[in-house]
């Protein structure tokens, strides 16, 4: 594995690999790698000639009161993990290299942000879309890999690629979980021991709502209320939201039909965690189609 | 020359040409071609294996009270002209194909728009940047050609490419003029005969300001005032602005030094015309450099 720290160098590498007809799989990350990232890299390894992983904690996607400065970083450990996952090029640019000046042109996300984390994290997805498109332009991937854990982010990336005709295939990869069901996240390290013990309640309640919907429950409002009530009692955190929305449009569901996401965000003392489950329900429309 | 009307088809063509190692020159236009566009295409012809021209009147860059509906169109004549200029692929997509839905993600231009046409045409350059990036993604050019007549647009495109790491070389091409100095423009057809007769006053006064600056004049305010006065008397139009700004930053000039643009916009009865001249002045800083 080759570690590359400048935009100019990785562009040279990409140019050379493409000239040789190699397909490129790209895994953008903010580092502090866990099994979720490794799963993305391994899938990229299987499906492409060359695997590029980026590690860049993007200041543009953090609000002024968010955790940019204290976002966990461990480049040495990340390097070992990336290599073991089969990454060919680990791209770790500096902020100055990615943003030599305040950018003259940025991306604005106009759909899929008026819900979930978009409501609390103003401008967050604009920052995500901007850096992801920059990284796509720099690494020119055939396929790019994103975790379904950040489902709203994935929905925004789908929107970005469609709206701007970006030539890349987006691959959404299933969330990797601890044995007790807690979604792997770089921010899990900030959980206090008693919080960590209770945190599996998040996935437990999401799974329960999924089962209820699959069993024919249609009262979305009641399901949400019950889930919030359960989380307040059992998660050890303050509930920010539980939502049941169409996916990837992220609009309120009127009928239990099509692809639906159940998502939650909770605030622990030092970490805000999110999780979701996605299900597909064959409703009347699907029956007619067949 | 092959005329292509869908995004899917031109992407197939681009894919094939790139696979064969061909370099691509791209000339984005809104059609109703004149000698300015032809000059762009001919330069692209000289410098690339394959030349793609697009003709697309982009609704996103027109304000609600602007001339989108009545922007002049003549696809048959354009096809003949494009072929004679050496274009290989003429891409003329429909609005529905370029914007199947309201886009989820668009571009926002944060610099270089708080001056000149950016002040009057709110959102115009956001629309320009969005469609140009879409077209870049669709045609994957090595080089893209833009006229210097739309100097603010060119400045925004430079900003777009730098900010988002777009892999394309932008080529700015000199303005083509009528014999009497009037800049070629698709909107010139809307001039009344007496307006057409007086319109060369625009370029005349811009050239005069340029000469004065080159001769050592430093009073930018006075030069602007004199130019506005002259245009009010001689152009037959209402003056919107005359500005003297750094280029491509488009900031007020404090010293007559570096690259400077003198730009004007005037409003005739049925057409708003713009023009500019760009000059480079070696000031004290430059003397020290040598």
Image (spheres, coloured by chain):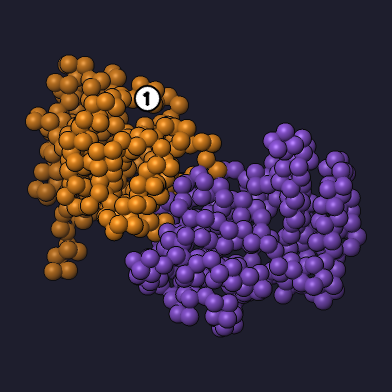
Chain colours: A purple, B orange
Quadrant hosting residue B89: top left
Q: Quadrant of the C terminus of chain B?
A: bottom left
Residue pointed to by mark 1 = B67
Residue B158 to residue A89: above or below: above
User: x, y percentage for residue A164?
Assistant: 47, 46
For label 1, the crowd category at 10 Å Cα-Cα, with few meaning under 14, some 14 to 19 and many 20 or more, is: some
Residue nearer the viewer, A66 or A208: A208
Residue drawn at the location 46% of the way across and 51% of the way down: A166
Q: Is residue A284 left or right of residue B245?
A: right
Residue drawn at the location 71% of the way across and 46% of the way down: A259
Residue drawn at the location 19% of the way across and 41% of the way down: B86
User: x, y percentage for residue A78?
Assistant: 58, 79
User: x, y percentage for residue B173?
Assistant: 20, 46
Residue B2 to residue A159: above or below: above
Quadrant hosting residue A41: bottom right
Residue drawn at the location 24% of the way across and 38% of the way down: B1
Q: Is residue A48 left or right of residue B71?
A: right
Residue nearer the viewer, A66 or A200: A200
Residue A178 to residue A99: above or below: below
Q: Secondary structure at mark 1?
A: loop
Residue nearer the viewer, B243 or A114: A114
Q: Is residue A115 visible?
A: no
Chain hosting mark 1: B
User: x, y percentage for residue A228?
Assistant: 85, 53
Quadrant hosting residue B127: top left
Q: Is residue B30 visible?
A: yes
Furthest residue in direction front, as rendered: A290
């Amino acid at each position: 594995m080759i570690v590359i720290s400048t935009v100019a160098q990785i562009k040279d590498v990409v140019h050379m690999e493409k000239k040789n007809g190699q397909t490129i799989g790209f895994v953008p990350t903010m580092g502090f790698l866990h099994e979720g990232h490794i799963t993305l890299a391994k899938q990229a390894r299987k499906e492409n000639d060359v695997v590029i992983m980026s590690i860049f904690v993007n200041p543009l996607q953090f609000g002024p009161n968010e955790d940019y400065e204290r976002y966990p970083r461990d480049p040495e450990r990340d390097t070992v993990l990336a290599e073991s996952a089969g990454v060919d090029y680990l791209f770790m640019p500096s902020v100055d290299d990615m943003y030599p000046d305040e950018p003259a042109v940025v991306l604005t996300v106009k759909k899929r942000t008026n819900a979930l984390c978009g409501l609390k994290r103003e401008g967050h997805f604009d920052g995500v879309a901007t850096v992801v498109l920059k990284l796509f332009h720099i690494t020119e991937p055939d396929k790019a890999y994103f975790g379904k854990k950040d489902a709203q982010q994935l929905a925004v990336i789908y929107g970005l690629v469609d709206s701007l005709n970006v030539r890349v295939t987006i691959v959404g990869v299933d969330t990797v979980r601890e044995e007790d069901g807690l979604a792997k996240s770089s921010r899990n390290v900030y959980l206090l021991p008693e919080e960590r013990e209770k945190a599996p309640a998040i996935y437990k309640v999401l799974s329960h709502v999924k089962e209820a919907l699959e069993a024919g429950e249609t009262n979305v409002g009641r399901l949400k209320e019950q889930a919030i009530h359960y989380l307040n009692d059992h998660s050890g955190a303050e509930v920010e939201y539980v939502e049941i929305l169409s996916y990837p449009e992220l609009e309120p569901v009127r009928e239990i039909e099509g692809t639906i996401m159940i998502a939650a965000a909770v605030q622990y003392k030092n970490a805000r965690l999110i999780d979701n489950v996605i299900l597909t329900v064959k409703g009347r429309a699907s029956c007619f189609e067949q």
